[in-house]
Image: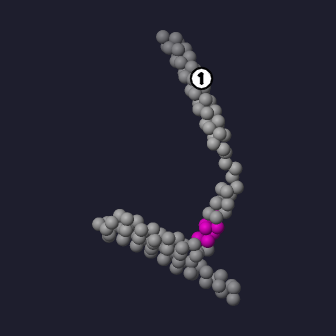
Amino acid sequence: MSSKAEAQEPRFDALKWIVVIAIVALCVVGNSYYSEASLLLRVVAISVAAAIAVFVAVQTEKGAAVWGLLKDAQTEVKKVVWPTPKETNQTTLIVVAVVLIMSLVLWGLDSLFGWIASLIIG
């Protein structure tokens, strides 16, 4: 029985993806057709339709895999050790100082090579 359920799974997945595509197409056409309607109403309608489309897409095998990937990514982001504001400020100041020093060094080298080139060329 499980092999029959697995065999039918792609057919239903294809039908679900067709429904998702149809919802998105209806949103595009409906947004153009009802362009005179209130923007707020159109945004609400498209948001509801998008939520329905996402719900249908998540019911597919690939949609469930993407949803799982997003949940795993959220878990990994929670594990990140974020710098404190003090560390962020210190790092920013170091980067600004290095950029300023390197710009002065490059400006000096450019001026030196320009002066040498003007001596050679005459």
Seen at 55% across and 14% down, the residue is 116
Please identify the quadrant where the N terminus is shown: bottom right
The way the protein has been coloured in the rendering is one colour
In-image side of 25 versus 106 (left or right) = left
Q: Residue furthest bottom?
A: 1
The secondary structure making up most of the magenta span is helix
**Element carrying mark 1:** helix
Q: Alpha-carbon neighbours of circle 1 within 10 Å: few (<14), some, or many (≥20)?
A: few
Which quadrant would residue 79 be assigned to in this image?
A: bottom right
The residue at 66%/56% (across/down) is 77
Which x, y percent locates residue 27?
41, 70
Residue identified by numbered label 1: 105
Whether residue 113 is visible here, answered yes or no, is no
The part of the image, by quadrant, that contains residue 76 is: bottom right
Residue 35: % across, % down: 31, 66
Q: Nearer the viewer, residue 4 or 53?
A: 53
Q: Nearer the viewer, residue 88 or 19?
A: 88
- Tell me residue 61's x, y (percent): 61, 74
Residue drawn where x is 57% and y is 81% of the image: 11
Outermost left residue: 36
Name above or below for residue 16 compared with residue 95: below
Position of residue 111 relative to residue 42, above or below, is above
Instruction: Count how many numbered circles sit on residues in the image.
Output: 1
Query: Is residue 85 visible to the viewer in this orientation of the structure?
Result: yes
* The residue stretch that appears in magenta: 62-69
Give the side of residue 62 with respect to residue 29, left or right.
right
Q: Residue at x 61, y 81 (%)?
A: 9
The reply, left or right, for residue 40 in relation to residue 112 is left
The question of residue 113 being in magenta is answered with: no
Q: Label 1 sits on what residue type?
A: Val
Residue 99 x %, y %: 59, 30
